Amino acid sequence: MVNAIPHQLRKGKIEFHSCMSKTDIIDVTVKPDPIVSEYPANYTVSGKLSHAIIADKTTFGVTYFIADGIVRLGDPYKQYFDKSYKAGKKFTISAEDVPTPLLSKVYQIYVNIWDEEIGTIACVFTKVNR
């Protein structure tokens, strides 16, 4: 008789870090974690920004890159905010079924909030070694 103990695969928490010194920091959660190559992911982004978010003008985006952070994997995902928020007010935006490209062994994910007039308001990234 063999004692079978359920084995759970180690799941690492994806941690995002600021990618530009003069932009705001945002909190990002991704499911599934870890991300599965070519399987859609759900993103939730929240925080308080120093600039207002304007509905139908400010966007939230997700872009995957190979390890060097230069060569893009797949097409960027972009979603307009459907609600406006004043500067300094807590916001949350969610995106379901964000396409995940075929991932390389080491890849990066950039998540940003962008305004048509200002440019990048917030940007975070993570580097994943799977």
Image (tube, rainbow, N blue to C red):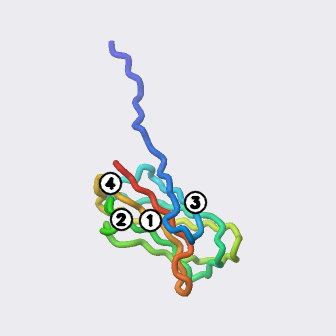
Task: Mark 4: give few (<14), some (14-19) or many (20+) Cα within 10 Å.
Answer: few
Spot occupied by residue 38 in the image (x, y as percentages of width and height): 32, 59
Residue 51: quadrant of the picture: bottom right
Identify the disc placed on residue 106: 4
Asked whether disc 4 touches disc 1, contact meaning CB atoms under 8 Å apart, the reply is no
Q: Which quarter of the rendered picture does the N terminus lie within?
A: top left
Upstream in sequence: badge 1 or badge 2: 2
Q: Amino acid at mark 1?
A: Tyr
**Distance between the Cα atoms at labels 4 and 1?**
14 Å
Residue at left 52%, top 76%? 120
Q: Amino acid at mark 3?
A: Asp
Upstream in sequence: badge 2 or badge 3: 3
Upstream in sequence: badge 2 or badge 4: 2
Asked whether disc 1 touches disc 2, contact meaning CB atoms under 8 Å apart, the reply is yes
The one nearer the camera, 57 or 112, is 112
Up-down relation of residue 21 to residue 83 (above or below): above
Up-down relation of residue 53 to residue 91 (above or below): below
- Label 1: which residue? 110
Spot occupied by residue 101 in the image (x, y as percentages of width and height): 32, 63
Q: Amino acid at mark 4?
A: Val
Spot occupied by residue 69 in the image (x, y as percentages of width and height): 36, 65
Q: Amino acid at mark 2?
A: Gly
Asked whether disc 2 touches disc 4, contact meaning CB atoms under 8 Å apart, the reply is no
Task: Mark 1: give few (<14), some (14-19) or many (20+) Cα within 10 Å.
Answer: many
- Label 3: which residue? 27
Residue 22: quadrant of the picture: bottom right
**Distance between the Cα atoms at labels 3 and 1?**
12 Å
Identify the disc placed on residue 13: none
The one nearer the camera, 116 or 41, is 116
Task: Mark 3: give few (<14), some (14-19) or many (20+) Cα within 10 Å.
Answer: some
